[in-house]
Image (tube, rainbow, N blue to C red):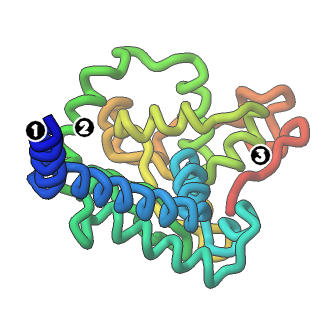
Amino acid sequence: MTDDAHGHGHAHDSSSAEPGGADEVADARAVERSLHRAAEAQPVDRQLEAILMIADEPQSLVALGAAVGAPIPAVRQAIERLVADFDGVDGTVRRGFELREVGGGWRFYVRQELDDVVEQFVEQERPSRLSQAALETLAVVAYKQPITRSQIASIRAVNVDGVVRTLVARGLIEESFTDAETGAINYVTSDLLLQQLGINSLDELPLISPLLDDGADGFGQNEGIPDGRA
């Protein structure tokens, strides 16, 4: 009985060295704990990732540092780690989006090689007619371009982020340039809009002044509406 018990015990000990045995399980758990600690050691990365995910404008290192309460060098290092992570460096999975620096700020963009599939999706999802909010926003851009989101929102007195994204997706407006000081993107109407309206240039748009209350002050001056130009 003792020999049998001893034999069984010896067999049990030798199994720990086999693939999938106790030693390998312990090693795997140790690696998992190490990775978990590494992730916890870089909370700034996750905070920046979350902020950039919902940002509609490129965010400067100063703005990002203020948002997460971290010094600029730490934010710069975190951005570099995120860029490498999303680009598939060091064995990570290359994502369908990239973190790109534009006009002194950072913002997520779809990778260029995936533009076609995203455009196809947008074509299938978008409604055939523009909403009243989209039409009003499009008119503001047409008459006040180049213009930023915040300037459009100031004129319309509502949040226009979603509407602007819709108009960009529809190809009716497009990004023209990024303000070097504020990082704000300026939007202009596209050639597609001219085609849809059946005109050759914006000079053929009807005058807006006769449609205002007094017909004299112009689009940007009536009832205290801000000028809106950068």
Measure the C-alpha gap from mark 3 to mark 2: 34 Å
Mark before the other along the chain sequence, 1 or 2: 1
| Residue linked to disc 2 | 119
Residue 148 is situated, as x and y percent measured from the top left of the image, at: 62, 53
* Quadrant assignment, res 83: bottom left
Whether residue 227 sits left or right of residue 97 in the image: it is: right
The secondary element bearing badge 3 is classed as loop
Tag shown at residue 4? 1
Q: How crowded is mark 1: few (under 14 residues within 10 Å), some or many (20 or more)?
A: few
Q: Name the residue rendered at 62%, 71% in the picture.
A: 60
The residue at 31%/40% (across/down) is 192
Name the residue tied to disc 3.
Answer: 220
**Marks 1 and 2 in Cβ contact (< 8 Å):** no
Name the amino acid type tagged 3: Gly
| Residue at image location 14% in from the left, 57% down from the top | 17
Camera sees residue 206 = no
State which tag comes first along the sequence, 3 or 2. 2
Please provide percent x and percent y for residue 47: 61, 56
- Snapshot quadrant of residue 71: bottom right
Q: Which amino acid does label 2 sit on?
A: Glu
